[in-house]
Amino acid sequence: MIIAKLAGGASNTFADDNSLLRHLGKRTMLHVVGILVDEGIDIYGMHVGGSAGRSVVFDLTSGQLEVRVGGEMIVI
């Protein structure tokens, strides 16, 4: 069984509101979710959107995904 955990998709706050780059993260994330759904891959958890960058650490042994955004850590 394959599952997915997603992180990312933040807005580019440095781009103009009308720029294609402004919402690139959101469009990419919507595309990724669509592909996963089409392929029958369950999305187990996600931390997406917003305007802050993220750092992620994935533990191959436990399957735990640590997402750091701002000063906060979220475990998926």
Image (cartoon, helix red, strand yellow):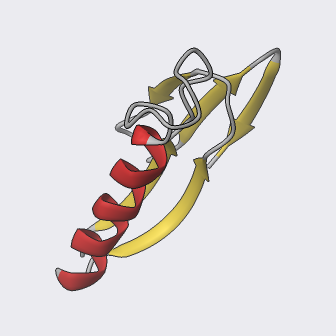
Q: Nearer the viewer, residue 50 or 7?
A: 50
- Say which quarter of the image contains residue 45: bottom right
Location of residue 66 with respect to 35 vertically, above or below: above
Q: Which percent across, then down, holds residue 51?
A: 67, 30
Residue at screen point 44% across, 32% down: 19
Q: Which percent across, then down, holds residue 43?
A: 44, 70
- Say which quarter of the image contains residue 25: top left
Residue at screen point 57% across, 34% down: 11
Instruction: Say left or right for 71 vs 6.
Output: right
Instruction: Say left or right for 51 vs 58.
Output: right
Residue at the extreme left: 39
- Is residue 62 in view from this perspective? no
Location of residue 3 with respect to 12 vertically, above or below: below
Location of residue 51 with respect to 49 vertically, above or below: above
Residue at screen point 22% across, 70% down: 35
Residue at the extreme right: 71
- Say which quarter of the image contains residue 66: top right
Q: Nearer the viewer, residue 33 or 62?
A: 33
Q: Nearer the viewer, residue 25 or 39?
A: 25
Residue at the extreme front: 18
Q: Quadrant of the N terminus?
A: bottom left
Q: How many marks?
A: 0
Residue at screen point 69% across, 39% down: 50
Location of residue 45 with respect to 76 vertically, above or below: below
Instruction: Say left or right for 31 vs 65.
Output: left
Instruction: Say left or right for 1 vs 3.
Output: left
Q: Nearer the viewer, residue 12 or 69?
A: 12
- Is residue 17 in view from this perspective? yes
Q: Which percent across, then down, holds residue 18?
A: 51, 37
Q: Which percent across, then down, holds residue 67?
A: 61, 31
